Image: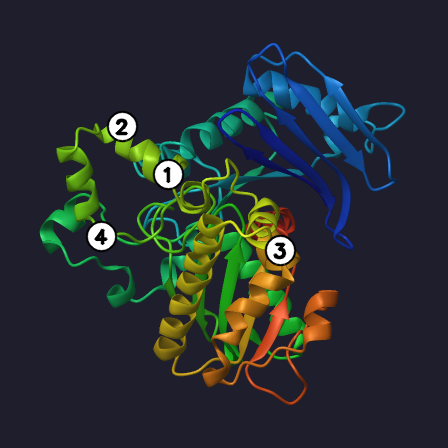
Amino acid sequence: MKILVVNAGSSSIKFTLFETKGEVLLAKGLIERINTPSTVMHFSTHKGQKFDQDISANSYEAAISQACLALMDKNTGVIGNLSEIEAIGHRVVHGGAAMTAASKLTKAVKQVILDCFALAPLHNPPNYEGIEACESLFPNVPMVAVFDTAFHQTMPPASYTYAIPLDVAQKNQIRRYGFHGTSHNYVAIKAASVLKRRMEDLKLITVHLGNGCSITAINHGRVEDTSMGMTPLEGLVMGTRCGDIDPAVIFVLRRLGYTLDDVDKMLNKASGLLGLAGIGSNDMRDLIKAVDEGNPRAKLALDVFVLRIVKYIGAYAAELNGFDALIFTAGIGENVPRIRSQVCEKLEFLGVKLDAARNKAREMIISCDDTSPVVMVVPTNEELMIARETECVLSSQS
């Protein structure tokens, strides 16, 4: 089955075409700066062909139309016509408490996505526009919504409940939802496969470190707890997000004259590694370079980043009553051995012991032989997971 995976962002669309038999990635692309004079498409295929092209796309539908033309191009395309696309899987950030699994797109499911606009105002609206664009372009192709929040909906009430008046919380859907669920689910399944054990027999801590960062405790296949909350702002220190802070900080900033919009932008766009390091970048490579050059603010930023990760791993080790594997993934988690080393140095009391050579070589298992827990680096593949879930949903309903 050929499945098109679509991830519509605020001004961009990522698209990936899979042949699910053998899980072959046929082509992928990114269209950036939609509805601007400088819209550009980056495209590549499994045959090694690549191109960057300036295009005209003043809407999501126009952008996806351009993606379709690239997929069918006589020189670089991978399909002869659009009828070869048998299903479309959409990444949707927020499904609230209602969506506990990937679901075929229906009017009711689309209404849930609409109802969650207030919970994910930066993500769900463009996700929805991407869906509507595909429905217009592919009117007879079945589509599936795969929710970032769905994997976390097995959390027990003690993990997702905030200690505010319960009637207020329930009336207004104020609770922890968690995000990056597709990534956490994928790497957990992959790790269990590498370890030759069932996920249902394992206790796992998955650490997704990118521009956005989150940690999840997985107890025998079910999420026990996760660090992101009602929004992606809670939890770890991230590229530009503050993560956990005393809520009263917001009131102090208001008294100092900052508007709520100012505070929102500060905590989401100007905090985290960017705000701490003060070097004009939140890229971990730039941060490490600044640390090595003796920049004290950059060192503080790195220390805070690492310590917050360690705190969450320690807390989740207690919640799980021990764990079998610690899994690093995403841009920083996969590609920065130094961060993994600094985190694991502080976890030796839990039995964590890295093999320095394996860690530097970025092998999949980076802990020393005959030590427990196992420490792993598992590259994430959210697009493949969306394709898998799309095929699974449609197969179960056929």
Residue denoted by label 2: 261
Where is residue 195 shown, x and y percent of the image?
65, 78
Work out whether mark 4 precedes mark 1 in sequence or the reverse, and give the earlier one.
Answer: 4
Q: Is residue 128 left or right of residue 85?
A: left
Above or below 216: residue 286: above
Given residues 322 and 100, the one toward you in this image is 322
Work out whether mark 1 precedes mark 3 in sequence or the reverse, and give the earlier one.
Answer: 1
Residue drawn where x is 75% and y is 30% of the image: 43
Q: Is residue 367 left or right of residue 99?
A: right
Work out whether mark 2 precedes mark 3 in sequence or the reverse, and give the earlier one.
Answer: 2
In the rendered structure, which amino acid carries the disc numbered 2? Asp
Question: Circle 1 sits in a helix, a strand or a loop, which is it?
Answer: helix
Question: Circle 3 sits in a helix, a strand or a loop, which is it?
Answer: loop
Residue denoted by label 1: 268
The crowding category of the residue bearing disc 2, from other C-alpha atoms within 10 Å (few below 14, some 14 to 19, many at least 20), is few
Work out whether mark 2 precedes mark 1 in sequence or the reverse, and give the earlier one.
Answer: 2
Kindly indicate whether the residue at mark 3 contacts the one at mark 2 (C-beta within 8 angstroms).
no
Residue drawn where x is 32% and y is 51% of the image: 97
Given residues 361 and 37, the one toward you in this image is 361
The crowding category of the residue bearing disc 1, from other C-alpha atoms within 10 Å (few below 14, some 14 to 19, many at least 20), is some
Residue denoted by label 4: 246
Q: Is residue 101 visible?
A: no
Kindly indicate whether the residue at mark 3 contacts the one at mark 1 (C-beta within 8 angstroms).
no
Q: Is residue 310 visible?
A: yes
Kindly indicate whether the residue at mark 3 contacts the one at mark 4 (C-beta within 8 angstroms).
no
Numbered mark located on residue 380 in the image? 3
In the rendered structure, which amino acid carries the disc numbered 1? Asn
